[in-house]
Image (spheres, rainbow, N blue to C red):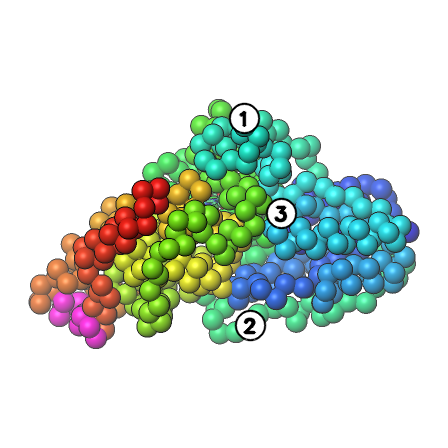
């Protein structure tokens, strides 16, 4: 009888334990995906549609294909088992609260129906219940967490991609895969920028060594391609984090490797979400519940559209809207601006990122937003309020990034690119910039907004 392989955010053939172990049995396999997530953001949906098509075509070259079903996951898994006569179900572990709850239900129902369940490790370096502090608690501070993870982690044995898959004698019914593709006009910039799927991830990976040569400093520069841009591929499991570790840990100590350390942050946020499932909704530090967030829909919309009057913030927000991705340094600057300069709720920003990021990941998004807000575990200290002008000057010194995303400022001289109001009248006119018309005046005065944020945060109490 066939084996069902349930694929979720592990859309790859290489180093995919569920596919590898199911294929190794020599029995027919039915790889399937259930479209049951109504909360997925728009950009992530675009990515997913493309990635599933890529996976289907890779599976077809092995004599198989992807079965896509729509609806409640429990119903779909059980009816697939019934239709196909499958007696085993393989999947790779996922860790988000919703996924864990669904998997628990499926496992119980499938076992009761006599179906063998084979669960494999997921696309994180650790399972959150395996790492504890000396006192036996979950970790709350990154550095000791990372030290422990880097010391204890052993990559699991590689699971090479199969060279062929045995097809079942009859395939169960499937819904139309192409219906999952997004073709809306807002996807045009993403289509130019990205190649979702395992082959695209591998192409990006090829370029990793050249990017890592100077990662320590280049990673903070949005004007150059100094980071791997692997985040959407990792978020969709088109590349295995274990394979990445095996490749990168060959030289030197993992704990000293700046890139592996970022993968450590990815695990840390997953650790936090597992132990605090309300991370996307509630302040991790409950003292922040008293924070008097403002409601200012017009200012929120200006931030979303990249019309705040602060060039580095606006460039980031437009990069996000156009490509579904934003550089990490600029994510921090734009998030800090929303929370601390505008005093808007970090959850408003988290929701917007969720809808617009191709790498949208519940743990990473919520963990990082709370980190910037100061309300998270091991968060940035509350008094750190990014200055959007000096950050711009420091990390985009020539203004290349701002010019790329804000064509209306492209001709401004470099000395004024991060603060257009400092350009002389003749410079503004030569650059065809009319402040307040072709480019907005600053939404708030940063110096005043900073003092307002500090006073508000101080009023929350000493621990905040
Ligand atoms: P690299 O610098 O090449 O890093 C390699 C990998 O390490 C990344 O692909 C990513 O998986 C991981 N990583 C790097 N930085 C972080 C970090 N700060 N936290 C966790 N993992 C990290 N990342 C997401 O994957 N999904 C999100 O939804 C997300 N939301 C964010 C929201 C905010 C407000 C901020 C400040 C950061 C967010 N990040 C998120 C983290 C980070 O910005 C991206 O992972 C990074 O920009 C991806 O680019 P890269 O692959 O070139 O990174």
Q: Mark 1 or mark 2, which is nearer to you?
A: 1
Which callout, 1 or 2, points at the residue further toward the start of the chain? 1
* Residue 340, picture quadrant: bottom left
Give me the residue at 66% from left, 71% from top. 179
Q: Which residue is tagged 2?
A: 183
Q: Position of residue 18 (x, y in %)?
A: 74, 45
> For numbered disc 2, what is the local secondary structure?
loop
**Callout 1: 10 Å neighbours few (<14), some, many (20+)?**
few
The Cα atoms of the two marked residues, 3 and 1, are separated by 23 Å
Question: Quick check: 21 left or right of 424?
Answer: right
In the picture, the quarter occupied by the C terminus is top left
The overriding secondary structure of the stretch rendered in magenta is loop
Q: Tag on residue 134?
A: 1
> For numbered disc 3, what is the local secondary structure?
loop
Q: Which residue is tagged 3?
A: 95
Which callout, 3 or 1, points at the residue further toward the start of the chain? 3
Numbered range of the magenta stretch: 428-437
Q: Is residue 140 magenta?
A: no
> For numbered disc 1, what is the local secondary structure?
loop
Q: Position of residue 366 (x, y in %)?
A: 48, 52
**Callout 3: 10 Å neighbours few (<14), some, many (20+)?**
some
Give me the residue at 67% from left, 50% from top. 100
The Cα atoms of the two marked residues, 1 and 2, are separated by 51 Å
Give me the residue at 37% from left, 47% from top. 374
Give me the residue at 80% from left, 46% from top. 117
The Cα atoms of the two marked residues, 3 and 2, are separated by 30 Å
Q: Position of residue 458 (x, y in %)?
A: 27, 48
Residue 222 visible (yes or no): no
3 and 1 marks in contact (CB < 8 Å): no
Q: Position of residue 1 (x, y in %)?
A: 91, 51
């Amino acid at each position: 009888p066939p084996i069902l392989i349930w694929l979720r955010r592990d859309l790859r053939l290489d180093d995919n334990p569920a596919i590898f172990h199911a294929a190794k049995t020599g029995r027919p396999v039915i790889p399937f995906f259930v479209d049951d997530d109504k909360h997925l953001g728009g950009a992530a949906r675009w990515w997913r549609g493309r990635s599933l098509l890529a996976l289907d075509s890779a599976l077809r070259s092995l004599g198989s294909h992807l079965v896509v079903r729509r609806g409640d996951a429990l119903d779909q898994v059980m009816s697939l088992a019934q239709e196909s006569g499958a007696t085993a179900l393989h999947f790779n572990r996922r860790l988000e609260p919703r996924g864990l709850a669904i998997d628990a239900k499926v496992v119980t129902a499938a076992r009761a129906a006599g179906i063998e369940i084979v669960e494999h490790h997921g696309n994180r370096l650790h399972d959150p219940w395996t790492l504890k502090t000396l006192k036996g608690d979950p970790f709350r501070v990154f550095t000791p967490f990372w030290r422990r993870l880097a010391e204890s982690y052993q990559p699991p044995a590689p699971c090479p991609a199969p060279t062929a898959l045995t097809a079942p004698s009859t395939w169960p019914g499937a819904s139309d895969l192409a219906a999952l593709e997004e073709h809306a006009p807002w996807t045009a910039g993403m289509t130019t920028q990205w190649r979702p799927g395992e082959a695209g991830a591998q192409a990006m990976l090829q370029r990793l060594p050249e990017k890592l040569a100077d990662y320590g400093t280049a990673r903070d520069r949005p004007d150059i391609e100094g980071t791997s841009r692997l985040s959407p591929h990792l978020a969709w499991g088109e590349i295995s984090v274990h394979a990445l570790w095996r490749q990168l840990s060959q030289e030197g100590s993992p704990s000293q490797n700046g890139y592996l350390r970022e993968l450590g942050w990815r695990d840390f946020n997953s650790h936090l979400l597992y132990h605090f499932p309300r991370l996307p909704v509630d302040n991790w530090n409950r003292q922040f519940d008293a924070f008097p967030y403002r409601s200012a829909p017009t200012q929120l919309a200006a931030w979303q559209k990249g019309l705040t009057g602060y060039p580095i913030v606006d460039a980031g927000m437009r990069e996000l809207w156009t490509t579904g991705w934003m550089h990490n340094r600029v994510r921090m600057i734009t998030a800090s601006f929303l929370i601390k300069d505008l005093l808007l709720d970090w959850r408003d920003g988290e929701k917007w990122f969720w809808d617009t990021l191709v790498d949208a990941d519940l743990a990473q998004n919520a963990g990082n937003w709370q980190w910037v807000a100061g309300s998270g575990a091991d968060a940035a200290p509350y008094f750190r309020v990014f200055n959007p002008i000096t950050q711009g000057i420091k990390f985009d010194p020539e203004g290349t990034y701002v010019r790329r995303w804000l064509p209306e400022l492209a001709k401004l001289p470099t000395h004024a690119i991060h603060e257009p109001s400092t350009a002389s009248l003749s410079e503004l006119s030569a650059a065809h910039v009319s402040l307040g018309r072709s480019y907005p005046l600053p939404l708030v005065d940063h110096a005043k907004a900073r003092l307002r944020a500090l006073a508000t945060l101080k009023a929350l109490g000493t621990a905040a």
